[in-house]
Amino acid sequence: MIAESLAEAVRGALVDGALPCADAFRIAKELKVAPAEVGRAADELGVKVSRCQLGLFGYGPKAEGKHRIVRPLAEVPPELAAEVQARLVEGRLPCAAAWAVAERLGRTRLEVSGAAEALGVRISRCQLGCF
């Protein structure tokens, strides 16, 4: 059962029928709930999450290969590579860890996911529960 305030917030944030990742996190902060709870609410409401802040999904039709915007960095700075490698869990970089690396190094989240791509590291454990 979803709290009505959460359901209303999710419905009110829809863009083209989907909930942008950034708005899901805004809702979580405003309602003082975990991001995963917002993700579960979206799922229960039959709403897809879009525009992943790491660029991994939600940007266009998957069938056309336009769903992702992340691209491998041409060159990964050593400090960024070391941070990514240090935070791997079972060989993957959890979404929350990617965000933490971006914050710690003053990089964008998309830069961190691009570094992971260049290093052959997959991102796991979406904070909203999307993957």
Image (cartoon, rainbow, N blue to C red):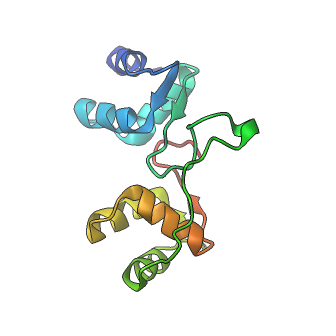
State the count of labels. 0
Q: Position of residue 40 (x, y in %)?
A: 50, 32
Depth order, front residue of 80/85: 80
Q: Quadrant of residue 72?
A: bottom right
Q: Quadrant of residue 34?
A: top left
Depth order, front residue of 80/71: 71
Q: Residue at x 56, y 38 (%)?
A: 59
Q: Position of residue 30 (x, y in %)?
A: 23, 31
Is 50 placed above or below 77 here? above
- 105 on left or right of 24: left
Is 38 placed above or below 16 here? below
Q: Position of residue 46 (x, y in %)?
A: 58, 21
- 45 on left or right of 97: right
Outermost residue toward the front?
74
Depth order, front residue of 104/61: 61
Outermost residue toward the right?
63
Residue 92: tell me if it is visible.
Answer: no
Is 21 placed above or below 81 here? above
Q: Position of residue 39 (x, y in %)?
A: 48, 34
- 68 on left or right of 8: right
Q: Residue at x 58, y 43 (%)?
A: 57
Residue 85: tell me if it is visible.
Answer: yes
Q: Residue at x 61, y 35 (%)?
A: 60
Q: Residue at x 47, y 57 (%)?
A: 95
Q: Quadrant of residue 121?
A: bottom right
